[in-house]
Amino acid sequence: MSTPPRIMATPAAMELISELEADHGPLMFHQSGGCCDGSSPMCYPKGELRVGPQDVLLGKIGETEVWIGSAQFELWKHTQLVLDVVPGRGAGFSLESPTGKRFLTRSRVFTPEEQAALEAAPPVRGT
């Protein structure tokens, strides 16, 4: 079995990412683990948020990297995260905030076969 992606995006999320890239250039996401906006995915210009060894690369949506803190990753590593968009105001520091839309993370539990494939391919960590 091939390794399933840890992160995916809905068509609505892909559309908003394209709009934000047109305005801001290359992007990155960090899946928040709490604080100001709960567990909202935060969208930044690429490189604006420094990632370190405590961060795990979930994967890419197109060319956009999606990171998560290692403590949060440990809690969610058994799930595939799906980036979606819903109406509403985004997080204060996230680029979609003024658009009237906000990113939201949905999830589904990996099957035992998918989980075994993922365990054989450890995730990349930041430097």
Image (cartoon, rainbow, N blue to C red):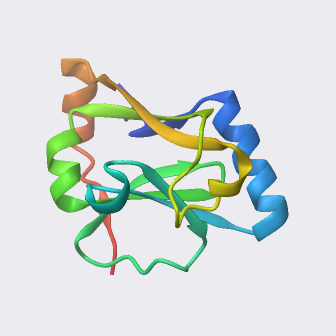
Left or right, residue 54 beside residue 41 = left
Left or right, residue 48 beside residue 107 = right
Name the quarter where the N terminus is drawn.
Answer: top left
- Number of on-image labels: 0
Q: Nearer the viewer, residue 74 or 5?
A: 74
Q: Residue at x 69, y 29 (%)?
A: 11
Query: Is residue 87 positioned above or below 48 on the image?
Result: above
Query: Is residue 121 positioned above or below 43 on the image?
Result: above
Q: Residue at x 38, y 76 (%)?
A: 51
Query: Is residue 14 positioned above or below 124 on the image?
Result: above
Q: Nearer the viewer, residue 115 or 35?
A: 35
Q: Residue at x 15, y 43 (%)?
A: 75
Q: Residue at x 70, y 56 (%)?
A: 98
Q: Position of residue 63 (x, y in %)?
A: 65, 57
Name the quarter where the C terminus is drawn.
Answer: bottom left
Image quadrant in which you'd find residue 4: top left
* Residue ranking furthest to the right: 22
Q: Position of residue 45 (x, y in %)?
A: 63, 72
Left or right, residue 65 beside residue 15 = left
Image quadrant in which you'd find residue 97: bottom right
Q: Position of residue 57 (x, y in %)?
A: 38, 59
Left or right, residue 80 beside residue 65 = left
Q: Position of residue 56 (x, y in %)?
A: 31, 61
